[in-house]
Image (cartoon, rainbow, N blue to C red):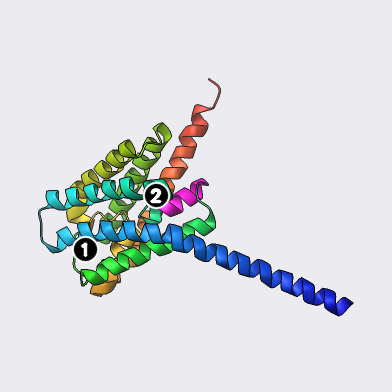
Amino acid sequence: YSHALWVLMLLHHYRVKMMFFLDFVEIVWKRGGIEAIGTFTMVMFGCGSVAMERTNLEISLTFGIGVALVILAIGRWTGAHINPAVSIAFWYRGDLSSMDTVAHVLGQLLGALCAGFLLNGAGPTIRNTTWLNLIGIEILITFLLMASILMIIRQTEKWIPIALVVGSSVAVLAFGFGKYTGASMNPARTFGPNLVSGDIAIIPIYFICTIFGAMLAVVVERFIASASELPE
């Protein structure tokens, strides 16, 4: 009897593990797949314009319009983060589960990598300033991007204004800082083209800076919210 009970407990344990695995695969397939398509589109358009050696204004507008269109296309299903820093920040904020966050990030990196391969590594993120300036700029502009996202989603749930605000933020920040750091603001945007082009040394720096900047925006949001609740 005890042996049979042990077998049943073992089977139940593996059944739970298998159900968790199947749920994760389904989430990765659905949410991760959608994020992969969105990130692929953004990288193809944005980095494609870099590869074509368009002007700074044209590149900035291409990235901004691309982000806005992707938000309109897939926002209703995944939020259209298309950016690991944004997804991790929303996880830190408590808006995204750990499983969904992993699915998002995997999809985003895969989508960017596919775009990088199709572009043959063209349009990678390039540093044209000191390392210290790069760190400061990428933290700042990712902070401002995430702050604009948090600001608009606190005011509306409609995708058109969200797309306009976020797309405009990307375009303005890219125009202002692209000539110094490439204005990545997005680990996936750097990961795909830079991995394929072989310029991989800077990838970890962009990962750390952009994720830190996005999470910092959530910290500031919490501080402002808690300060506003203090009695006068």
Q: How far across and how far down the image is residue 7, in percent?
A: 79, 77
Q: Please report whichever mark, 2 or 1, sits nearer to the chain's N-terminal start.
A: 1
Mark-to-mark CA distance, 2 and 1: 21 Å
Q: Magenta segment, which residues?
A: 87-95
Residue designated by label 1:
126
Total number of numbered discs in the rendering: 2
226 or 158: nearer the eye?
A: 158
Please tell me which residue is depicted at 84% across the width and 74% down the height of the picture: 5
In reply to whether residue 52 is colored magenta, the answer given is no
Q: Residue furthest top?
A: 232
Please tell me which residue is depicted at 56% across the width and 66% down the height of the picture: 22
In reply to whether residue 94 is colored magenta, the answer given is yes
Q: Which mark is residue 20?
A: none
- Circle 1 — which element? loop
Residue designated by label 2:
214
Please state if 93 lies on the left or on the right of 64 as rendered. right
- Circle 2 — which element? helix
Please tell me which residue is depicted at 27% across the width and 47% down the height of the picture: 69
Q: How far across and how far down the image is residue 21, in percent?
A: 57, 68
Please state if 163 lies on the left or on the right of 17 as rendered. left
57 or 139: nearer the eye?
A: 57
